[in-house]
Image: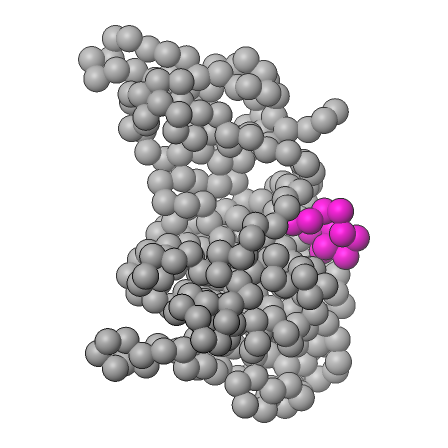
Amino acid sequence: MIYIAGEKIAQGECRHLEIPVARLPTQTMISLPVTVINGVEEGAKLWLSAAIHGNEINGVEIIRQVTQQIKPKKLQGTLIAVPIVNIFGFIEQSRYLPDRRDLNRSFPGSANGSLASRLAHLFMEEIVNRCTHGIDLHTAAIHRINLPQIRANLEDSETYKIAQAFGAPLMLHSTTRDGSLRQAASKKGIPVLLYEGGEALRLDSQTIKVGVKGIFRVMKALKMYDFPKDFMKDNLTLESRQSSWIRANRSGILHLKIKLGEKVKKKQTIGIILDAFGENQSKVKATVSGIIIGHTQNPLVNQGDAIVNLAFFND
């Protein structure tokens, strides 16, 4: 059995928990929603988290679809799913907490710190510390869109194994950022995948499909669940160690000539920037050969704005 927030979840049981976080000024209690599916046998303990940034909602739907399909009697190990970590930001449709702090820069947190720090501490104590592996689900920031991709420390053998198993179109080696959930968990020796895909405040069916199947593949690799072989067929995954943003060389109205997942060559024209009259134009060219893994959705750009994200390959 497993204990979370003082609640006992027996083997072969699925429980929905609400862990109190804090009260709103109206005195309404805000709670952390958690689904715990405890298998009938011991095994890996995997957490799924989404909406650490409150406006990144694809992961909420991914977790819903995953948990609905997992049967406790067929599960080996434990699945702990938290579909909305930043409840405050989710309510406000905002990336941030009410004090404008970024929750994913507040880990491992403190029981006596800011609201962000307290929520981070609660998540570490009740979720991360009970798990052996983790998958954190994200989208691009507001006004941007990302190709479905895994970001992880590919130099760690266990992390690399589950990143390959996930089977996203791309896996990108990525160092951790100070205060991030991934950094805090990694310091505890827990392999973590960060899944990026789609855009903020939108549900993208392809991103969701890739995410759901990727989680199932990881669960199979961890010997937690047995899925039909035809459902688990491998995907072609590109591996990159570097990425770079192409920035606007002038202000104006951007017209992109590329799409997500497209391969481009160095010096290829990937867009043009026009003035308000549509006369003076400036070409935007790829700085390296690579694959488009993200781009802005806002055509109004200022000089220096990040507009296209390229992953590239040493070979």
Where, by quadrant of the figure, is residue 185 drawn?
A: bottom right
Q: How many marks?
A: 0
Quarter of the image that includes the N terminus: bottom right
Task: Using the image as rendered, state which of residue 286 and residue 184 is in the foreground.
Answer: 184
Tell me which segment is drawn in magenta. Answer: 152-164
Quarter of the image that includes the C terminus: top right
Q: Identify the residue shown where x is 28% and y is 75%.
A: 24
Question: In the figure, is residue 215 to the left or right of 17?
Answer: right
Q: Identify the residue shown where x is 72% and y is 63%.
A: 189
Task: Using the image as rendered, state which of residue 231 and residue 294 is in the foreground.
Answer: 294
Q: Tell whether position 162 is magenta.
A: yes
Q: Identify the residue shown where x is 50% and y is 30%.
A: 245
Q: Identify the residue shown where x is 64% and y is 76%.
A: 130
Q: Position of residue 48 (x, y in %)?
A: 56, 65
Question: In the figure, is residue 260 to the left or right of 158?
Answer: left
Q: Is residue 75 in sight in this rendering?
A: no
